[in-house]
Image (spheres, rainbow, N blue to C red):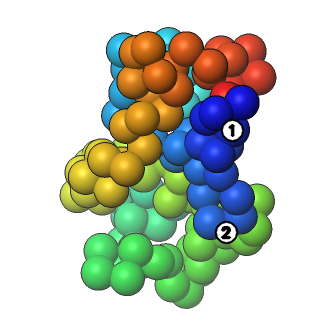
Amino acid sequence: GLYAGCNGDDKGSALDCVECYPDCVQPVDLCTDCVGAAPCFAEGAGCDSFDQDTMMWSGLYAGCNGDDKGSALDCVECYPDCVQPVDLCTDCVGAAPCFAEGAGCDSFDQDTMMW
């Protein structure tokens, strides 16, 4: 359909911005999938080896940087005590048509999470 481009490519998709448009998409508690990332953000553990500037872990917690399947950074908003929140939605302005009522939102399938 008209909004299939919202599904994205290897650089990302509008779905990366889903939490910025709660009127269109019923929120999924993304943090339930982030329990495994907790050590990466724990005080006295991964949080101590996390560099806010590079958004990377070092040393013992370098594995938190992840691989092509994702990284602990995907869970950053679930652990605000360790990482200063970045307003991810400022980068999501371009995705607005994908979630607009009467536009992309109407062709978004909640079950498949695809347009």
Residue at the image point whose x is 49% and y is 77% from the top:
57
Residue at the extreme front: 2
Going by the numbered disc 2, the residue's amino acid type is: Gly
- Residue 16 percent coordinates (x, y): 52, 46
> Which mark is drawn over residue 66?
2
Look at the numbered disc 1 and give the secondary structure of its residue: helix
- Look at mark 1 in the image and give the residue it sits on: 4
Mark 2 or mark 1, earlier in chain: 1
> Quick one: quadrant of the C terminus?
top right
- Residue 25 percent coordinates (x, y): 49, 18
Going by the numbered disc 1, the residue's amino acid type is: Ala
Q: Which of these two is toward me, 85 or 23?
A: 23
Residue at the image point whose x is 73% and y is 70% from the top:
67
Residue at the image point whose x is 61% and y is 35% from the top:
3
Is residue 5 depicted above or below 29 in this figure? below
Dot 1 crowding, Cα within 10 Å, few <14, some 14–19, many 20+: few
Is residue 21 depicted above or below 101 in this figure? below
Q: Which of these two is toward me, 56 or 60?
A: 56
Q: Quadrant of residue 109?
A: top right
Cα–Cα span, label 2 and label 1: 28 Å
Q: Is residue 22 left or right of residue 109?
A: left
Q: Quadrant of residue 108?
A: top right
Residue 115 visible, this orientation: yes
> Quick one: quadrant of the N terminus?
top right
